[in-house]
């Protein structure tokens, strides 16, 4: 047997329609020596009030099709003064009213604290008791104006705590130092390296 192949890790499929998410996750996976492949399956997103449920259910649906080690990620923006809205509805809110609509909703509100939360769900033939979940969060606030050209979604109005720039004003590397997604994907990668048989 080729001794090098024994230690070679298989590619993990990242099922997402979002290339920006894929770029962010790929950078992190690379730090761990892992390779990701982009899989856009266009699955219907289940309706639920929990991103964990959405991630878990979508991972199971994707596994029925791909039948190889994969993960999905579901994320949301939770605004304190709006009682966690848009949360699981972030995708709908983004595509309907977008960043300008969110800023309008927040006009006159002085408490602008918010959090991004990400849930990664890993599924393989070894996770039969259910997908393994990894959560990442980042606290921050909603800016009064949209700033920056980078990133996607609500990046132009999210200012992570301790930084005076929005996510859209950061490079991928900078965003990856503190984002919700980077935290969840790092947890996934550490887990995979410690439990290689799950992706073999
Ligand atoms: P999804 O369902 O995981 O794709 O995320 C729902 C929505 O949350 C997306 O359409 C984006 O508008 C927003 N979102 C999620 N993650 C991010 C991020 O890292 N930056 C900015 N917006 C995000």
Image (cartoon, rainbow, N blue to C red):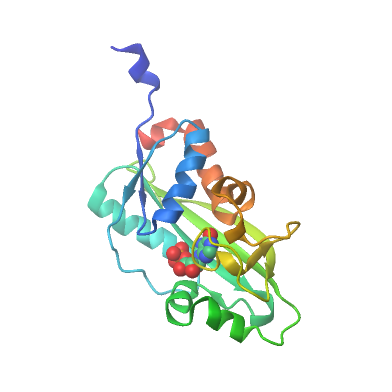
108 relative to 86 in the view: left or right: right
Q: Residue 77 is drawn in which quadrant?
A: bottom right
Which residue is drawn at the image coordinates 49% and 77% (left, top)?
A: 98
Q: Is residue 124 left or right of residue 161?
A: left
Is residue 53 something one can see in this rendering? no
Q: Is residue 74 above or below residue 105?
A: above
Answer yes or no: is residue 13 visible. yes
Quarter of the picture holding the C terminus: top left
Examine the rendered structure and indicate whether residue 105 appears above or below residue 78. Answer: below
Instruction: Where is residue 100? Give x, y as percent.
Output: 54, 80
Quarter where residue 105 is shown? bottom right
Horizontal relation, residue 76 to residue 68: left or right: right
Residue 108 in the image: above or below residue 126: below
Residue 76 in the image: state x and y as whole percent: 53, 67
In this orientation, which residue lies closer to the viewer: 67 or 28? Answer: 28
Please state the horizontal and vertical placement of residue 125, each as a whole percent of the image: 32, 42
Q: Going by the picture, which residue comes out furthest to the left? A: 65
Q: Quadrant of residue 45?
A: bottom left
């Amino acid at each position: 047997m080729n001794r090098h192949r024994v230690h070679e890790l298989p590619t993990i499929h990242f099922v997402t329609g979002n290339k920006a998410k894929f770029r962010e996750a790929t950078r992190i996976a690379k730090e761990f020596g892992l390779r990701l492949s982009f899989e856009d399956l266009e699955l219907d997103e289940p309706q639920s009030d929990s991103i964990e449920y959405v991630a878990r259910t979508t991972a199971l649906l994707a596994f029925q099709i791909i039948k190889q080690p994969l993960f999905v990620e579901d994320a949301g923006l939770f605004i304190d003064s709006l009682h966690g809205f848009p949360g699981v509805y972030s995708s709908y809110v983004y595509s309907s009213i977008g960043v300008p609509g969110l800023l309008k909703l927040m006009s006159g509100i002085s408490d602008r604290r918010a959090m991004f939360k990400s849930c990664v769900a890993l599924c393989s033939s070894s996770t039969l008791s259910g997908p393994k979940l990894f959560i990442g969060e980042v606290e921050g606030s909603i800016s009064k104006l949209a700033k920056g050209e980078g990133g996607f979604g609500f990046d132009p109005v999210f200012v992570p705590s301790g930084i005076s720039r929005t996510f859209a004003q950061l490079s991928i590397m900078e965003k990856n130092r503190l984002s919700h997604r980077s935290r969840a994907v790092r947890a996934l990668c550490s887990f995979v390296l410690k439990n290689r048989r799950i992706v073999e």
